[in-house]
Image: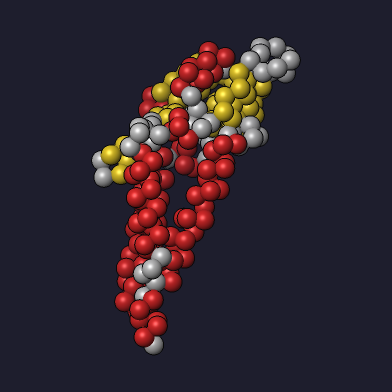
Amino acid sequence: MPPALVARAAARHRSAGWWVPPLVGLGWIAIAAMLLIGPLWALVFGALLALAPVAAARLRRTRWEIDAPGDGARFRWGVDAARSAALADIGGIVEQVAPGASSRGIPVTRDSELWHLVGHDGAWLGTAATSGLDPADVERARALVPGERIPYGLARRIGAIPADAPWHVRHPGRAVWVAGLVSLAVMALLLATTAELSWVALLAG
């Protein structure tokens, strides 16, 4: 029997508006310019350039599949819909808003949601992200996936976040801080070594 819903992710569903492509283009030009500063800059920002096609390919391969209700029906999600949970095992969903990205106050990507699936025994079954999906497909999925829904903030207050969920799911604020500190440390390293390890200094000898 074919799935009741097949939802495929696409870049156009992530974009906040028509202004995003030219803004992203300017960003890539700026990153390319960073390669000219020095070898460490080239290493860091060259990696970003190299990973961009990989991220785009993963987005195109991301989809949700939800079987029609019945024995063995499953909810599949992620890249190639590789993650899954039986619909009968889903007792509830903790819905967490994932704010979209912005650049200097200009929105780049739309807000999305993270669906943290919780079993009837309180165990964590996985997290399905709506990023890149058509909002209409997300609403259809909301009607097909069973379980009581609860906002993330309320779930934290009442202790409904599964204890076996990953650390970043249980502590999203701390995860943001760690990511920010790592980014600052990398930038500080780059700035501190620019004078000695710039292309100009290295070529001058």
Residue 18's x, y, as percent?
35, 33
Q: Which residue extends farthest bottom?
A: 205
Locate the N terminus by quadrant.
top right
Residue shown at 66% from the left, 13% from the top: 68
Q: Is residue 63 left or right of residue 169?
A: right
Question: Does residue 124 appear in this view?
Answer: no
Question: Does residue 154 appear in this view?
Answer: yes
Residue 158's x, y, as percent?
41, 25
Please name whichever residue, 153 or 37, is drawn nearer the observer in this view of the structure.
Answer: 37
Residue 161's x, y, as percent?
48, 30
Residue 83's x, y, as percent?
63, 33
Please name whichever residue, 62 or 164, is drawn nearer the observer in this view of the structure.
Answer: 62
Q: Is residue 101 above or below residue 203?
A: above
Q: Is residue 203 above or below residue 145?
A: below
Please name whichever residue, 147 or 160, is drawn nearer the observer in this view of the structure.
Answer: 147
Residue shown at 45% from the left, 32% from the top: 12
